[in-house]
Image: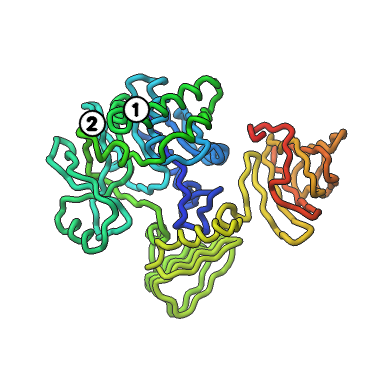
Amino acid sequence: MLIPVILSGGAGTRLWPVSREAHPKPFMRLPDGFSLLQKTMQRASSLTGVSRVLTVTNKEYYFQTREEYSHLKNLTVPMDYLLEPMGRNTAPAIALAAYWAKTYAPDATLLVLPADHLIEDLAGFEQTVEKALTLAEQGRLVTFGIQPDHPETGYGYIELGDANGVGHDIRRFVEKPDVETASQYLASGKFVWNAGMFAFKASVFLDALQTHCPDLCQMAAVCWEKTQETGVTPWLLDTGSFQQLQDISIDYAVMEKATNAAVIPAAFDWNDIGVWTAMESTLTPDAAGNRVDGEALLIDSQNCYVRSESRLVAGIGLEDMLIIDTADALLIAPKEKAQDVKKIVARLKASNHEAFRLHRTVHRPWGTYTILEDSPGYKIKRIVVKTGASLSLQLHHHRSEHWVVVSGTAKIVNGETEVLVRTNESAYIPAGTPHRLMNPGVIDCVMIEVQSGQYLGEDDIVRLEDNYGRL
């Protein structure tokens, strides 16, 4: 029984300002309109023999993940979720997935797929997976290797050992090398990039984890047992035991130590969308080597990448530049500094600037809100509530709210009253008043919210009831 496991959690700090803590890179839209997460699900669910797909992600991303999947057509495979209360790297995530799989199907084979890889050659991908599954059935821990075409310093490498039929034994794993070493690896033809994709039987992986990282294996078992005791799905992993799990990658915990590890050289294209220079490769360049996603006017400029979400970007005399423009943040950097974008995020996080965490448009289980203006004493938002959805029953200590419906219909609880508010009608919510908004209609409800008060932070929300488990 084949169960793809999609790992969706990386913050993607080198892809700021589009990727942010509350909206990480798996949700980023590619030029064709699909997200990396959607493409991963399409790729996983289309494989022959798949019984169901398990997604391991942070609990904060669950509703948005489910929303992403809901837009995929002809997706009939059952979907399951393991929700992490916090990040703990790949080894704990895969260990919990393996315990879950053994509970569901004792002889299950897992195909572990990060949600931030771009693979367009689906036929080649399926052929490579079939080879990997052949070795997995023989009790091997299989990883995928990508044939390098340039001396990349941002990836780990695997040195190929003896051939073992459809793949190779692994001689060694190598950390990200310098340019000179990477050039030597490329010239030798004996090294592949470590793609971070895996195939193995759940039982075989847990046996290896018990041998090479027993503390993690045992604590993961405790976490899964405590999680099962709740009986609530999607499975929200037990917080107390999960936070005790070692923060370690699968390579360090198991693959570099295992004697039954193998690597399959991939027969497909592969792009690890980790930096903006990787993202630009998804576009076709113009005659001057410029790549543009959005609207841009470039004069006397060569080899630039421009991504603009909502407005015209103009440049003159630029060369080898990255320009990434969003509603509330603009990144400008030479391409050679693409790896250093994470330093900006670190600086923003250290100063507690909201731009490291949130976009101007924020996704919620019920829809979205967009901050139109934020000034001392007042804040203006555009709120979109999906049909059938409902905000929590809540109150605010420090602000009042004025809601104006501009499209659709809202059912509003305002203290002891409940009213229908239609297009071009409004409601006023005094500070301290329990209130709730529901969309009973068949179209989205769109409204403008004006907040007034001395403190307008998002943490001034006291939830009394909630349909999405956020109390």
| Residue in view at x 30 percent, y 50 percent | 269
Residue 232 in picture, x, y percent from top left: 56, 23
The amino acid sitting under disc 2 is Arg
Q: Earlier in the sequence, mark 2 or mark 1?
A: 1
Quadrant in which residue 393 is drawn: top right
Colouring style:
rainbow
Residue 200 in picture, x, y percent from top left: 29, 31
Residue 387 in picture, x, y percent from top left: 68, 37
Quadrant in which residue 62 is drawn: top right
The amino acid sitting under disc 1 is Leu
Alpha carbons under labels 2 and 1: distance apart: 15 Å
Q: Is residue 300 visible?
A: yes
Q: Which quadrant, please, contains the C terminus?
A: top right
Q: Which residue is the site of mark 1?
A: 2
Determine whether, in the image, residue 247 is placed left or right of residue 376: left
| Residue in view at x 67 percent, y 49 percent | 369
Q: Which quadrant, please, contains the N terminus?
A: top left
Determine whether, in the image, residue 10 is placed left or right of residue 444: left
Residue 65 in picture, x, y percent from top left: 52, 39
Crowding at mark 1 (Cα within 10 Å: few <14, some 14-19, many 20+): many
Crowding at mark 2 (Cα within 10 Å: few <14, some 14-19, many 20+): many
Q: Residue furthest left?
A: 162
The kind of secondary structure element at disc 1 is: strand
Q: Residue furthest right?
A: 416
Which mark, residue 140? 2
Along the line of sight, the residue nearer the viewer: 32 or 457: 457
Determine whether, in the image, residue 251 is placed left or right of residue 88: left
Q: Is residue 193 above or below residue 310?
A: above
Q: Is residue 199 above or below residue 15?
A: above
The kind of secondary structure element at disc 2 is: loop
Q: How many marks?
A: 2
